[in-house]
Image (cartoon, rainbow, N blue to C red):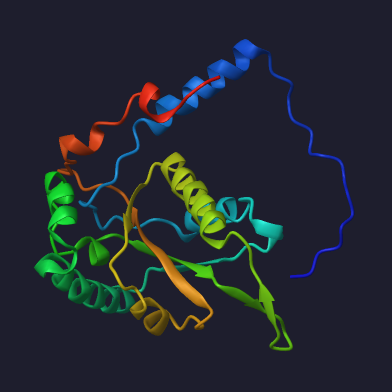
Amino acid sequence: MDFDYDPIPLPARPKLSQAEGLTRCTDYLEVMSTRRTVRHFSSQPVDRQIIETAVRAAGTAPSGANHQPWHFACVCDPGIKREIRLAAEAEERAFYAGKAGDSWLQDIGPLGTNADKPFLETAPWLIAIFAERFGVDKQGNKRKNYYISESVGIATGFLITALHEAGLATLTHTPSPMKFLNQILGRPTNERPFVLLVVGHTAPDARVPRAATQKKPLSDIASFR
């Protein structure tokens, strides 16, 4: 897309007192504190409109030069989900067989993960998020993108938050390598898979590792001067 620099007024937003701002921020913290990465999904359908709206929210994220270097390939087709699962599990078997290295396998041990990924078929939606290494205009000319990983990472965070607000659970799945997603989903070579997001409702008996609920305190993640 080409954009003309034409400054316009900011959209009107309500003026909040410091107390109101703190209340809203605290409410948001409480909501996000209930977010958990899950691996036990139900097959309960999720309306496409919810997915579309969440992706639109992700598309509002800031990006380098406003190039918006992302693509969200949303999949609900059972046959395609099956293809993705088979390809992902092939990579995962190599990963757990030693490709990952002892240190990494030791660190993820408390999470109880393995090479079996049934959630890739059970969950109603998979969203493959691609990072656009460079843009291509209608004439086939390349256009440089900037801060690609940062931009796509922020957009992914927006997407996860929107889906959580919709009452849905997510799992960020990153088999390595993920080039099979380009082939299965017909995405061009100028895009690289960034993350495969599993989306749906949690299974009635869903559980999460206790270790995953242990978050660092503020003193460990922030400094104030």
Image height of 52 relative to 139, above or below = above
The relative height of residue 16 versus residue 160 in the rendered view (above or below) is above
The residue at the far top in this view is: 19
Q: Which residue lies furthest to the bottom in this view?
A: 139
Give the quadrant of residue 78: bottom left
Residue at the spot 53% in from the left edge and 23% down from the top edge: 25
In the rendered image, the vertical position of residue 213 relative to residue 50, given as above or below: above
Q: Quadrant of the C terminus?
A: top right
User: Residue placed at 46% from the left, 43% from the top?
Assistant: 161
Q: Given the current orientation, which residue lies at the most extreme front position?
A: 225
From the viewer's perspective, is 146 left or right of 81?
right
Please give the count of numbered marks on the rendered protein: 0
Q: Where is residue 138 in the image (x, y as percent from the top left)?
A: 72, 85
Residue 20 is left or right of residue 184, and the answer is: right
Residue 125, quarter of the rendered image: bottom left
Return the x and y of residue 72 as percentages of the image width and height. Answer: 50, 66
Relative horizontal placement of residue 115, taking residue 3 as reference (left or right): left
Q: Is residue 17 above or below residue 160?
A: above
Residue at the spot 29% in from the left edge and 45% down from the top edge = 37
Residue 200, percent from left and from top: 33, 53
Q: Nearer the viewer, residue 116 or 142?
A: 142
